[in-house]
Image (cartoon, helix red, strand yellow):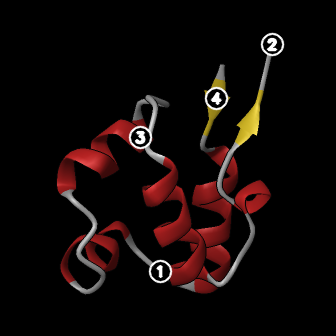
Amino acid sequence: MVSYEPLWETMERKGITTYALIHKNNINPRTVTNLRHDRGITVDTLEKLCKILDCTPNDVLKFID
């Protein structure tokens, strides 16, 4: 299972809100909902998030048993 807990921690550290993801960085609101509920995202979305947050995939998601 995938957890996006690292994403929320990274966003807080970088001072980026979900509002900014949606309205300033053109991330689809449905994608943000998927992230909140630990649902799957595309590799393209992962890449966009990493560019926006200037981070690596490990700062966005983690795998849990």
Q: Amino acid at mark 1?
A: Ile
Q: CA distance from mark 4 to mark 2?
A: 9 Å
Q: Which residue is mark 3?
A: 36
Return the disc, 4 or 1, that comes first in the chain's sequence.
4
Nearer to us of marks 2 and 1 is 2
Quadrant containing the N terminus in the rendered view: top right
Horizontal and vertical percent position of residue 15: 54, 84
**Label 2 or label 1, whichever comes before in sequence order:** 1
- Amino acid type at circle 3 is Arg
Residue that badge 1 annotates: 16
In the picture, the disc for residue 2 is 4
Task: Tell me if label 3 and label 4 are in contact, CB under 8 Å.
Answer: no
20 on left or right of 36: left
In the rendered image, which residue does mark 2 sit on? Answer: 65
Spatial separation of the CA atoms under disc 4 and disc 1: 21 Å
Picture coordinates of residue 30, whole percent (x, y): 20, 45
Q: Residues within 10 Å of mark 4 (few under 14, many from 20)?
A: some
Q: Could you tell me residue 13's position as x and y percent?
A: 67, 78
If the image is split into quadrants, where does the C terminus sit? top right
- The amino acid marked with disc number 4 is Val
Residue placed most toward the observer, 30 or 51:
51
Q: Which mark is residue 4?
A: none
